Image: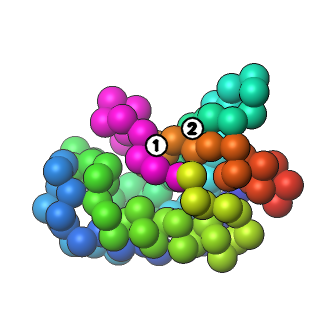
Amino acid sequence: MYKVNATLNTNGNGYWSRKKAAVEITHLQLAYINDELDFGELRVYFNTKTWFVNADGLIYTDKQFMRELKELLTQKGFDASDVSYSEQGMQGDNFVSCDVGERFINTFMQNA
């Protein structure tokens, strides 16, 4: 687990939510990594007081959130070039699920 104190924004243009909001990010976790270390799942946990999935919908597919997430990851020293949303069914009530590749995994394991 990698603690984060950051705020990312949604622009309300995702398929699953129309809400524009500032979302407090609390920590990151590589929840899964395959044996080849070239594919995994990154969970981006958020404070449910700033985003409540049952009322606000899923952050999934919000382009501004993903753009700001990649900027945050890059600022933290991670290679975010192979980070993208995972499928809708992987999204959680308190995290955004992302697919990550070898470049991100390598830098996360070195820096986290």
10 versus 41 height, above or below: below
Q: Which residue is mark 2?
A: 41
Q: Position of residue 59 (x, y in %)?
A: 31, 54
Q: Position of residue 48 (x, y in %)?
A: 39, 55
Q: Position of residue 64 (x, y in %)?
A: 33, 70
Q: Which residue is mark 1?
A: 97
Q: Report whether 71 appears left or right of 87.
A: right
Query: Helix or strand or loop: what does disc 2 sit on?
Result: strand
37 and 91: which one is in front? 37
54 versus 81 height, above or below: above
Query: Helix or strand or loop: what does disc 1 sit on?
Result: strand
- Looking at marks 1 and 2 on the same chain, the residue that comes earlier in the sequence is marked by 2
Q: Report whether 107 appears left or right of 69.
A: right
Q: Which residues are magenta?
A: 83-93
Q: Are marks 1 and 2 in contact (CB under 8 Å)?
A: yes
Is residue 33 in the magenta section?
no
| Three-letter amino acid code at the position of disc 1 | Ser
Colouring: rainbow
Location of the C terminus by quadrant is bottom right
What is the quadrant of residue 33 in the picture?
top right
Question: What residue is at 22 percent from the left and 45 percent from the top?
Answer: 54
The mark total stands at 2
Q: Position of residue 95 (x, y in %)?
A: 45, 47
| Three-letter amino acid code at the position of disc 2 | Glu
